[in-house]
Image (cartoon, rainbow, N blue to C red):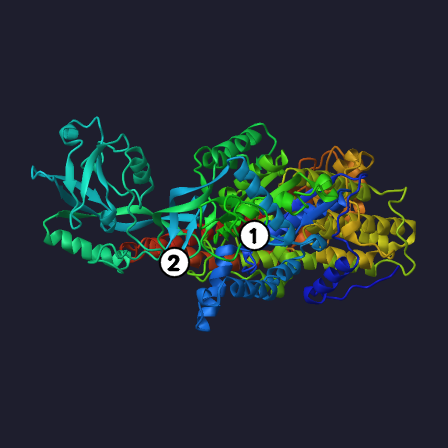
């Protein structure tokens, strides 16, 4: 075997070729294999509207590391890929494109719109999949799914009908979150809250009998049009006498009652609250308790309805201004005060959400939430880190019924039908229905389901459910869900209760939570800040392996991380270090080299590196089991860069140069450790490791399918490893001392090693000469030597004659010259800091900077004086 690697590693010429080889040889394909344990990850399906961003890159990198590790560890490892139809986002894109053509969806009709939507999905929906491949994602693409494909759609209908028949889905009039821009309902999870500057308008509502008025305050005077009562607390002594009295609603003239309700906070404001059941969730509940009328005053796009001619057709905020003006003219406005309050906005478009009464479909959540809480408390599913269980419990323990209907066309259509003649309703999986009462054709519900309804079924619908497929029986429940903390409520909770209700088991045993990828300043990446970083551009510059390794190294479960380009460059440099080490090894193998495994005769340095590698294999395995992927990266980096490249390769050079059996043994060990390193590193940096592997082997094997290294007790050489560490520590100490004294590597010096372990150090003579620039060594249990400098370790003191290291006269001349230069720096900084004018006028940061410069100069002066003293004593 004799293969050469190019001088420079070029990811652009490697990655696509390697990925195609993996694909051509079905390396990602998982099989139902009774002889193996299954390990399954379902990808959090990216939106078909999506473009790969750094959050995706982190998420997919972590999943790919886990799936490659498990595949190499003997599991039948399945990573199920797929995409989400992203109902609101996709429809918005298509509607926008149509608007540029001068069309609306209502003009072309539902069927023509759906044709356009599917065509759009075909054209753009696969884009993010191809981008995931660039990252190296080893998904089983033969099992790729889409939330609106035939199988997933069948599962959605099956669950809807089942829930409806069990009373878990119902249709009713409730207060919902309404987006006036998207013109659809939103679930609670789809509403983002933000602080907005607003006002409290204090108003007077007069009594019908002319006996006075009550004062109250509101942040939304435009909703006054829909007031149907005013409420006070029944225990509020100030208002007991007015309970049951009638008020006249300002501007409208409607008669409204004063009702008593415990919802009212006695201590907040005046203790009087206007009740608008159609436009506030709390008021809606008060209205139900007191049987109040529900009057909707806004259209779907948040304009005032025709019922109020003075304001009809006005946008809600324009109407607010006009209503406040009219209240002031009528003498109803008492005062206005500034007030910041928390306002809900649409997670897609940012429009302020309008609470609105509407007839919608809901999932009854309490009976579904309880088993989901119990499953985590019983340890059937664990969160990593554990602290995110609190977030999970908080959402489930305070959950409201889930509004699942959406007023858009792209998505799973609700399988409900209505008879316009007799009012009958039917829920069925069939695509059409005839009224069971009057025999007339029925009209299908025009609404679609919340995107998260189908995403909630993803772990089992993608494996064939509701059919009992072989995949479902073998690969389900899945194992690890990797996701960001920002969608615990959106997705994790819904998968948990959906799986428990429909399959009787949890969907996964572990939820690995990661944080956000922020910019170098710690800011969230966003379009508005213009600080987003395109992973594909970084891959083009540095290679996928460098990006992956940086993301994995910087990751700690549950924590945000910063994207720092210099760290990607450092990862690329690491890849180059590995490449160059591999080139060296290959170039120093004979033409007829055959890898035979570890030789029977091992030198001490061989046992040291083998033992260190064996420990590394154990620790990396433990780190991966504990999802400490960043820690595993750091250990791999340290071993490859320091132990293998900087030490072991250098330690073997004299043997290889000398030739013979010792050289052959060194070559076998170099290759053995290299093969093991490549395998350990492969899940993190798959491309470069696969490329080197194929140059290092001649059997046509693929590293992706090799066994992951395991700890082997037989390769634990503790005694020899500990002994050799003493030699390494001594060489390091000598190198550091020479570096501090600016002694060139070519200058040789004799080492006198004072130690109780004389035999160990004598055996390392060659290494001191090669790696510590020693002209020779002498060992003893004690030395008394004049004019030496000393390096100290925990097992030895190493004395080096001063005259061996430096020409005293020249060195003194150099040091005195440097002393004068440093003294000038000290005088300059001291002068500035002793100048009252500088201290009074200079910025604090500049003063602090000058203090640090002075401290560094004084430290340098102290070292120079120590060196001069050592040379003149």
Q: Residue 325 sits in which quadrant?
A: bottom left
Q: Which residue is mark 1?
A: 432
Dot 1 or dot 2, earlier in sequence: 2
Nearer to us of marks 1 and 2 is 1
Image: 86 above or below 714:
below
Q: Residues within 10 Å of mark 1 (few under 14, many from 20)?
A: few
Q: Which residue is mark 2?
A: 181
Is 728 in front, or is 55?
55
Residue 421, position as x, y percentages in the image: 44, 49
Which residue is at the far left?
211
Name the element at disc 1.
loop
Distance CA(mark 1)–CA(mark 2):
31 Å
Is 35 in front, or is 751?
35
**Label 2 near label 1: C-beta < 8 Å?**
no
Residue 710, position as x, y percentages in the image: 77, 40
**Position of 164 compared to 790: left or right?**
left
Q: Residues within 10 Å of mark 2 (few under 14, many from 20)?
A: some
Residue 308, position as x, y percentages in the image: 22, 55
**Which quadrant of the rendered structure holds the N terminus?**
bottom right
For image coordinates 75% across by 58% down, the residue present is 23
**Position of 674 compared to 552: left or right?**
right
Is 426 in front, or is 818?
426
Is 784 in front, or is 104?
104
């Amino acid at each position: 075997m004799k293969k050469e690697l190019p001088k420079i590693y070029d990811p652009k010429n490697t990655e696509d070729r390697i990925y195609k080889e993996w694909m051509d040889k079905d390396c990602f394909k998982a099989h139902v294999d009774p002889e193996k344990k299954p390990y399954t990850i379902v990808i959090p399906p990216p939106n078909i509207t999506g473009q790969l961003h750094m959050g995706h890159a982190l998420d997919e990198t972590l999943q790919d590391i886990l799936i490659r590790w498990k595949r190499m560890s003997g599991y039948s490892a399945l990573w199920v890929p797929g995409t989400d139809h992203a109902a609101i986002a996709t429809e918005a894109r298509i509607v926008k494109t149509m608007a540029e053509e001068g069309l609306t969806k209502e003009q072309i009709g539902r069927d023509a719109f759906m044709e356009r939507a599917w065509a759009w999905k075909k054209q753009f929906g696969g884009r993010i999949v191809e981008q995931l491949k660039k990252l190296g994602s080893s998904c089983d693409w033969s099992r790729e799914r889409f939330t609106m494909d035939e199988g997933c759609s069948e599962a959605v209908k099956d669950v809807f009908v089942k829930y409806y028949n069990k009373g878990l889905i119902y249709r009713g009039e409730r207060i919902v979150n309404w987006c006036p821009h998207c013109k659809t309902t939103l679930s609670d999870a789809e509403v983002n809250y933000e602080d907005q500057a607003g006002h409290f308008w204090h108003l007077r509502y007069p009594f019908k009998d002319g006996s006075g008025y009550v004062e109250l305050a509101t942040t939304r005077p435009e909703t006054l049009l829909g007031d149907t009562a005013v409420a006070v607390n029944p225990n509020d002594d100030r208002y007991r006498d007015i309970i049951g009295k009638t008020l006249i609603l300002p501007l409208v003239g409607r008669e409204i009652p004063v009702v008593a309700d415990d919802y009212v906070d006695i201590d907040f404001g005046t203790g009087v609250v206007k009740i608008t059941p159609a436009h506030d969730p709390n008021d809606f509940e008060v209205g139900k308790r007191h049987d109040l009328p529900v009057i909707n005053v806004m259209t779907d796009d948040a304009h005032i309805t025709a019922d109020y001619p003075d304001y009809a057709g006005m946008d809600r905020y324009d109407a607010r201004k006009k209503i406040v003006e009219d209240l002031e003219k009528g003498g109803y406005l008492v005062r206005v005060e500034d007030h910041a309050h928390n306002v809900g906005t649409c997670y897609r478009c940012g429009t302020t959400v309008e609470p609105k009464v509407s007839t919608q479909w809901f999932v009854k959540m309490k009976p579904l939430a309880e088993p989901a809480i119990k499953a985590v408390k019983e340890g059937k599913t664990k969160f990593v880190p554990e602290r995110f269980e609190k977030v999970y419990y908080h959402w489930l323990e305070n959950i409201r019924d889930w509004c699942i209907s959406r007023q858009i066309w792209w998505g799973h259509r609700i399988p409900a039908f209505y008879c316009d003649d007799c009012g009958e309703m039917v829920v069925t999986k069939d695509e059409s229905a005839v009224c069971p009462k009057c025999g007339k054709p029925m009209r299908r519900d025009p609404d679609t389901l919340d995107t998260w309804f189908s995403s909630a079924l993803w772990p089992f619908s993608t494996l064939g459910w509701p059919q009992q497929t072989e995949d479902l029986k073998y690969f389900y429940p899945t194992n690890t869900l990797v996701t960001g903390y920002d969608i615990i409520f959106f997705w994790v909770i819904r998968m948990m209760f959906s799986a428990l209700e429909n399959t009787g088991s949890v969907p996964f045993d572990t939820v690995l939570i990661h944080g956000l990828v922020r910019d170098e300043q710690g800011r969230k990446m966003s379009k508005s800040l213009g600080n987003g970083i395109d992973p594909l551009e970084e891959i083009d510059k540095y290679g996928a392996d460098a990006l992956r390794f940086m993301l994995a190294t910087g990751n700690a479960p549950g924590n945000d991380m910063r994207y720092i380009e210099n760290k990607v460059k450092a990862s690329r440099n690491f890849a180059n270090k590995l490449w160059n080490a591999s080139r060296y090894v290959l170039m120093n193998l004979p033409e007829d080299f055959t890898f035979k495994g570890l030789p029977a005769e091992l030198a001490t340095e061989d046992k040291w590196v083998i033992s260190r590698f064996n420990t590394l294999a154990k620790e990396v395995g433990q780190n991966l089991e504990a999802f400490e992927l960043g820690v595993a990266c750091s250990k791999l980096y340290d071993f490859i860069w320091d132990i293998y490249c900087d030490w072991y390769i250098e330690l073997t050079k004299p043997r290889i140069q000398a030739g013979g059996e010792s050289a052959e043994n060194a070559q076998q060990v170099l290759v053995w450790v290299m093969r093991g390193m490549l395998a350990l590193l492969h899940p993190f940096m798959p491309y470069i490791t696969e490329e080197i592997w194929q140059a290092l082997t001649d059997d046509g094997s693929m590293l992706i399918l090799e066994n992951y290294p395991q700890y082997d007790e037989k390769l634990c050489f503790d005694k020899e490893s500990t002994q050799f560490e003493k030699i390494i520590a001594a060489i390091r100490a000598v190198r550091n001392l020479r570096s501090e004294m600016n002694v060139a590597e070519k200058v040789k010096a004799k080492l006198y090693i004072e130690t109780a372990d004389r035999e160990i150090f004598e055996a390392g003579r060659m290494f001191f000469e090669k790696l510590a620039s020693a002209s020779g060594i002498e060992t003893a249990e004690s030395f008394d030597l004049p004019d030496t400098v000393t390096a100290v370790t925990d097992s030895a003191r190493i004395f080096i004659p001063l005259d061996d290291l430096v020409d005293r006269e020249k060195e003194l001349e150099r040091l005195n010259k440097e002393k004068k230069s440093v003294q000038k720096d000290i005088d300059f900084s001291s002068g500035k800091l002793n100048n009252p004018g500088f201290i009074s006028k200079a910025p604090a940061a500049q003063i602090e900077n000058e203090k640090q410069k002075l401290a560094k100069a004084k430290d340098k002066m102290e070292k120079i004086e120590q060196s001069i003293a050592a040379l003149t004593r």
